[in-house]
Image (cartoon, rainbow, N blue to C red):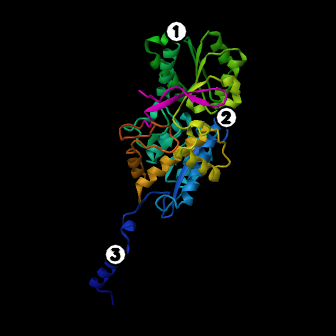
Amino acid sequence: MGMKPVVLAALCLSAIAALSPAQAQKHYDPGVTDSQILLGHSIPLSGPASATAALGLAESDYFNMINDQGGVNGRKIKLLQLDDGYNPARTLEAIRKLVEQDHVFLIYATQGTPPNIAIQKYLTVNKVPQLFIGSGAGRWNDPKHFPWTIPVIPSYVAEAKIFAKYILAHKPDAKIAILYQNDDFGRDYFNGLKAGLGDKVKQLVAVQSYEATDPTISSQIITLQSSGADAFVIAAIPVQAAQAIHKAADLGWHPMMFLDYIANSPATTLKAAGHEQSTGVISTFFVRDPSDPQWQGTPALADFEAWQKKYGADLSRDDPQNVNGYVLAQLMVETLKRCGDNLTRANVIEQATHISNFAAKMLLPGVTISYSPTDYSPFHKLQIEQFDGTRYRPLGAPVSID
């Protein structure tokens, strides 16, 4: 004999009532359970951009700390890292594996312009967030056409404009040379430099490009040096940036030298080039240097050092990539916290694009991260600094990005 409808209805209502409000309102996409959030990223642990590997290690170490503290809203973060060697074909292969086989929730902090270009269409079509990517190419600030792709570092064009303004302010009659990587990354710097020079663009007297796979760039530096330029902008990844600095010194060429923030690490690029040869290099920053005495005794540095001592003992204290990873991981945690139990891919984008003036620990004073649904550019100020042979020192206060 069947159960009476009234009894069946009462049992169903009792079962629903037994569920907590949180359980009834949970919404998950692939990669999320009650206990875990699975993230994936591809990073050059090997190859010409392997200096950025420290960033990925720092991110993992930060998530380990968060997990020991109970995770994000009770869920542990697991980050799957694959090595793409800064090879776009390998990046696409890695991302497809992470999405289709490992079923990650989102793709996080994949590094480099060519690798991210290789995966953007695939992730957009599949509506998988390409979140907080390590590229400042102008193409990423395009929420209308690519709402699933959000960058986390300053615009390359903006940094190049800052360099141009600095040159014109401090050496108005400078003859300027530029070395740039022959892809969207390098061309953004080239175009930004020209835009920043405006009607002074005629002072750009020498231009040379290189391929990311080039084993040496000596011939390009010889050509640039022969132009008589006394200001030199390097838009390169760490391997070629170090070669450029070292070769210029070998040639006895000592122009006012500018280095993109992608390659400005004293622990990698400048060490490879030689700290003496690198003295005087100018770059921009958005995070604090933990070796800078001015930050000693501040709460931000105390927290950073406590984290690194316990979780990042394998990381070099002087590598800015560690601080970048530390800051970037904070941003990811903040975004996930805001999602609550609505851990869908669409809600991650919704939360990320409503972050305003996020002052992550170890960002420079006056520098914050903001996004809106119509503007994916994260930074609006940068700090100009100069390497003195030991560490970078600030040149004035943070400057606004146009």
- Picture quarter containing residue 22? bottom left
* Circle number at residue 59: none
**Secondary structure type for disc 1:** loop
> Residue 372's spot in the image, x, y percent?
37, 41
**The magenta segment:** 377-402
Instruction: Say which residue label 1 marks.
Output: 173
Residue hosting label 3: 17
Check residue 399 for magenta coloring.
yes
For mark 2, give the secondary structure: loop
Type of the residue with mark 1:
Asp
Query: Vertically, is 212 above or below 311?
Result: above
Viewer-proximal residue among 282 and 157: 282
Circle 3: element type: helix
**226 to 22, vertically: above or below:** above
Are there few (<14), some (14-19), or many (20+) residues within 10 Å of tag 2? many
Whichever of callouts 3 and 2 sits on the residue coming sooner in the sequence is: 3
The amino acid pointed to by label 2 is Thr
Let me know if residue 180 appears in the view: no
Q: Is residue 301 left or right of residue 249?
A: left
Q: Nearer the viewer, mark 3 or mark 1?
A: 1
Q: Going by the picture, which residue comes out furthest to the bottom?
A: 1
Q: Amino acid at mark 3?
A: Ala
Identify residue for label 2: 268
Q: Position of residue 359 (x, y in %)?
A: 45, 43
Position of the C terminus, as image quadrant, is top left
CB contact under 8 Å: marks 3 and 2:
no
How many other residues sit within 10 Å of disc 3, few (<14), some (14-19) or many (≥20)? few
| Residue 105 magenta | no
